[in-house]
Image (cartoon, rainbow, N blue to C red):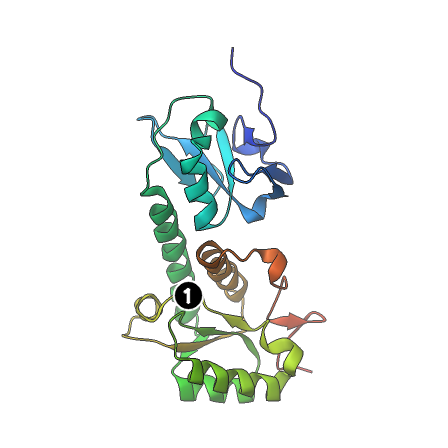
Amino acid sequence: MMARATDENDDGPEETGPERTCIATRTRHPVDDLIRFVAAPDGTVVPDLKRNLPGRGVWVSATRDAVAEAIRKKAFSRGLKAQVQADGALPALVESLLAKQAREAISLANKAGLVVSGFDKVEAAIGRGPVHVVIHASDAAADGVRKLSQAVKRRFGESVAAEMTLRGLNFEELGLALGRSHVIHAALLDGPASRLCVARLRALERYRTGKTDRDIPDDPGHEDGKPLGQS
């Protein structure tokens, strides 16, 4: 008889619930702060980023360290109630899938005309508004980040500057998303594709840095329901 699902696992994607327990840390989180994993037919553990794969699933905090800890503790076999394979390549696989989602979201926003790139163009966009968020490559030089942050503070106020900054992708990944080489700074303008883009970038940044959405305001591009840069 199949064991009954607990709050650390589920019997299918329809049983996500508002919160789940991470099998690595044993702490409860909203499902948006977790990654669902299932067992493939060959017994390997695979990430279910869209939370729609059939079968029993388990939940891990959406950070690289937590995924690695779940492997170290052999928590996947325990949670999935089966002998499954979760090797050291799994954290990198999750990261590559999250990075791909972020690149695709930026590419779609770019095709919609919602992205400008290059220091001078980003600085000009901040001055004009409305800017949803400013995207810096994770390996951008501190001086350029500081200067654009100062521009954001002057335009929107100091309290907003941190909310408007995302750094999920490195310069090569950002360039790949925009179809050019070595993009260091970009601005995401307000538009229908902006929210998905921000969500994807946050998920990647959270996975790589360990920060959760509890550390970041829900909507950095808006204040009182209006796009930043509009009064």
Residue 70 picture quarter: top left
- Is residue 49 something that shows in the picture? no
Depth check: give the residue in front, 126 or 166.
Answer: 166
Residue carrying label 1: 106
- Give x and y (percent) for residue 88: 33, 41
Residue 16 picture quarter: top right
Secondary structure under tag 1 reads helix
* Crowdedness near tag 1: few (<14), some (14–19) or many (≥20) residues, C-alpha within 10 Å: many
- Give x and y (percent) for residue 166: 49, 69
At horizontal 40% and vertical 72% (from top left) the residue drawn is 137
Image height of 182 relative to 18, above or below: below
Image height of 203 relative to 70, above or below: below
At horizontal 72% and vertical 71% (from top left) the residue drawn is 224
At horizontal 31% and vertical 43% (from top left) the residue drawn is 89
Give the residue furthest to the right. 224
Screen quadrant of the C terminus: bottom right
Q: Amino acid at mark 1?
A: Ile
- Give x and y (percent) for residue 60: 50, 41
Q: Is residue 39 left or right of residue 188?
A: left
Q: Is residue 69 left or right of residue 96?
A: right
At horizontal 34% and vertical 49% (from top left) the residue drawn is 92
- Give x and y (percent) for residue 42: 30, 26
